[in-house]
Amino acid sequence: MKNPELLLPAGSLEKMRAAYDFGADAVYAGQPRYSLRARNNEFRLEQLAQGIAEAHARGKKFFVTSNLYAHNDKVRSYLRDLEPVIALGPDALIMADPGLIMQVREKWPHVPIHLSVQANTTNWAAVRFWQSVGVARIILSRELSLKEVEQIRQACPGMELEVFVHGALCMAYSGRCLLSGYFNRRDPNQGTCTNACRWNYATHEADVDPNTGEALAQGARLADFSFASEQERAEKAANEAVHDGAMPSATGQQRHPKADKVYLIEEEGRPGQLMPIMEDEHGTYIMNSKDLRAVELVERLCRIGVDSLKIEGRTKSLYYVARTAQVYRRAIDDAVAGRPFNPALITELEGLANRGYTSGFLERHPIQSYQNYETGHSTSTRSQFVGEVRACADGWAEVETKNRFAVGDLIEIIHPAGNRTCRLAAMKNAEGQSLQVASGSPLRVWIPMDGPADGALIARVFEPQAA
């Protein structure tokens, strides 16, 4: 059974260190201007140099993400801007653009290249093609099932394979979405996504112009219908009779009366701006996907022989990085040691803010299980990140608060040496005065602490309400 690499996101040096502390074998961070997190990237050349040096000193790996599809202006400057990054000695570049890959292979043939998920590799023939041009690892498309991953592994035994196991999903092919570019002129494929798929939309039934097919707000003046022929009108009436009565279609399948209607959507922040939206048997694409969680499938992926398990989230919190690293580290170690899956790992991931979880396409489910129709914001139902330990002295820990917590709360101390829970018995401020409540960020408070605590994260555990 393969003991795969655990690969975590690094949105900052602090998150990189947490990833390593809690079990990651490698991290990935974005190259300035050329990764898909251009707006939320704390890494510049100086931070990349420090991160790569620290990783190698710890015996860990550091990959640099350079995975945008370049327009001409960025092709012109790409090799110039990449040269000082290559000089730092990253363990690999994560890339997607074939032209940029060609240029890097020609100039620096010794640098390993990992093919980004943005390249949408979905079959063994594509893997063999990329292997033939010198790519060292393929990050497989998120649209693959476990069976397809296994088939690729068997057909391409000499290629490293990487699979996403946790993090945000997009209702777009491997994240290649145009919504943000359409609404805000911020191109997701150039690193400036505004997450338009997470916005709140209302739907309005629409009329359809019979000549142009354009969706119009009900009550708006339609174009002259007289241009439609008698045959076209008869066909339209017959189709409406089928759909309005939920009659069988030509394929014999029953469809809901509203399945083929056209609707307009109205985004919460843009009242009065109505946009057409349609839904077919595959779902509605301007919609909020659930988050990927495949911790229960780690053992299967190890058995298949996947080389790296990847967690998404360079813009996520320090708590997210630490918790996911710790949980997936334990899942990998259990799988390799032959221990049964521990369901408590699922419970621990429920403590992270999430939009509901799905195993995505790794396991086939009814299509509605991929989408979160109820809310666009993250929620946590088990615990909440409330602080980071900044110092320890005389049995007390100084906590930089992130959210509200109070004396009497059940708290979890999350530490690389192991987690533990306790009832918070006391709290004081910097002057030693007793406190009952830490009202939220940014505060510094002191709480009693037994056991290892340097660098620990603090979570408030939600407890069932008494009946």
Image (cartoon, rainbow, N blue to C red):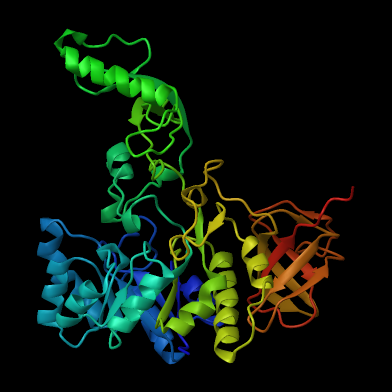
* Residue at image location 33% in from the left, 44% down from the top: 180
Determine which quarter of the picture holds residue 391: bottom right
* Residue at image location 74% in from the left, 73% down from the top: 397
Spot occupied by residue 93 in the image (x, y as percentages of width and height): 27, 76
Residue 232 in sight in this render: yes
Spot occupied by residue 279 in the image (x, y as percentages of width and height): 38, 36
Spot occupied by residue 332 in the image (x, y as percentages of width and height): 54, 82
Residue 208 in sight in this render: no
Q: Is residue 310 left or right of residue 384?
A: left
Q: Is residue 353 left or right of residue 242?
A: right
Spot occupied by residue 98 in the image (x, y as percentages of width and height): 15, 68
Q: How many numbered callouts?
A: 0
Q: Residue furthest right?
A: 467
Determine which quarter of the picture holds residue 35: bottom left
Determine which quarter of the picture holds residue 245: top left
When the figure is inspected, residue 103 is found, relative to residue 406, above or below; the finding is below
In front: 356, or 447?
Answer: 356
Q: Is residue 408 left or right of residue 127?
A: right
* Residue at image location 20% in from the left, 60% down from the top: 69
When the figure is inspected, residue 439 is found, relative to residue 83, above or below; the finding is above
* Residue at image location 64% in from the left, 58% down from the top: 402
When the figure is inspected, residue 358 is found, relative to residue 121, above or below; the finding is above
In front: 35, or 462?
Answer: 462
